[in-house]
Amino acid sequence: MLRTELTQWIDDLLQVSQFKDYAPNGLQVEGCLNVQKILCAVTASRAVIEKAIEIQADTLLVHHGMFWKSEPSTIIGWKKQRIFKLLQNNINLLAYHLPLDAHPEIGNNAQLAQKLGYTVCQQVEEQGLLSLCISQEKQTLNQLSQKITHTLKRQPLVIGDGNQTIHRIGICTGGGQSFFQAATLYGIDAFITGEASEAQYHLANETNTAFIAAGHHATERYGIQALSQKIQQQWGVECVFFDEENPI
């Protein structure tokens, strides 16, 4: 298929125009016109780019792309090396950040909730980036922690009473810890995100709301995989997922 067809289809699916983001969504580095093989990953790291070259993928589809508003705009050092490898091998780089977090079906929040046996009942806060979820089964915080460990293949940081019953949770994957304070106002029992900052420890204790940091990379594996599955079903384009090991 044509690169322009793919980008337009994803833009429409994820409703990219509805989001204010601090990274460009869509085509970030232009490569070949025809798309036949896509490598999907969480981040456009050098290791991921080298994997794309190894398997002869013509397109790289990621959640974390190459350009961020908070970074210098100069293309030097590590950024130059990444971009050079893409251009040298005529590989497209497509990146979708907040639109992939918030999508109600294939988004990172929705996919993580599904993996943990929760149903998203409401999307709230800025751009719908906080998902409120419920579970039909009763489980303690210790049991939820064990399920997260089994599902994500890593042990999360958990703050709270392990015997507390968890029914309603808030989810904001990746670096969503800043949503914790707002999430506590919705009557949740626990909040799941990727990372933790110092303040969340005190807030969890003082609001009796469990806080779980399960890994930025680990909590954001599933959205890009769900998107790639949609592409395969819709267009028949080969998609390969590469899960780079990242403990953060």
Image (spheres, rainbow, N blue to C red):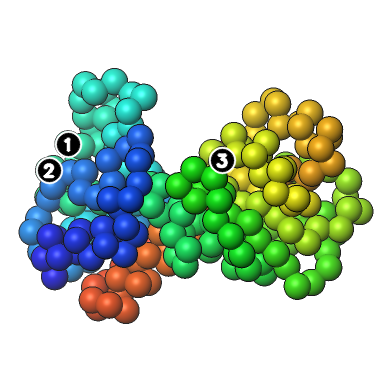
Q: Determine the residue positioned at 26% across, 58% down.
A: 11
Mark in the foreground, 2 or 3: 3
Residue 23: in sight, yes or no?
Answer: yes
Locate the C terminus by quadrant: top right
Name the amino acid, label 2: Gln
Q: What is the x, y in percent for residue 25? A: 28, 46
Q: Callout 1: few (<14), some (14-19), or many (20+) C-alpha neighbours within 10 Å?
A: few
Residue nearest the viewer, comparing 17 with 193: 17
Residue nearest the viewer, comparing 45 with 20: 20
Label 2, secondary structure: give it: helix
Going from N to C along the chain, the mark reached first, 1 or 3, is: 1
Going from N to C along the chain, the mark reached first, 2 or 3, is: 2
For disc 2, the marked residue is 88
Q: Is residue 174 left or right of residue 226?
A: right
For disc 1, the marked residue is 84
Q: CA distance from mark 2 to mark 3?
A: 35 Å
Q: Determine the residue positioned at 79% across, 28% down.
A: 202
Which corner quadrant of the image does residue 119 belong to? bottom right
Is residue 22 shown above or below 61? above
Label 3, secondary structure: give it: loop
Name the amino acid, label 1: Phe
Q: Determine the residue positioned at 41% across, 47% down.
A: 98
Which corner quadrant of the image does residue 41 belong to? bottom left
For disc 3, the marked residue is 176
Is residue 92 shown above or below 122? above
Q: Is residue 232 left or right of residue 151?
A: left
Q: CA distance from mark 1 to mark 3?
A: 31 Å
Q: In the current view of this chain or complex, which residue is farthest to the right? A: 163
Q: Is residue 124 left or right of residue 158?
A: left
Residue nearest the viewer, comparing 119 with 95: 119
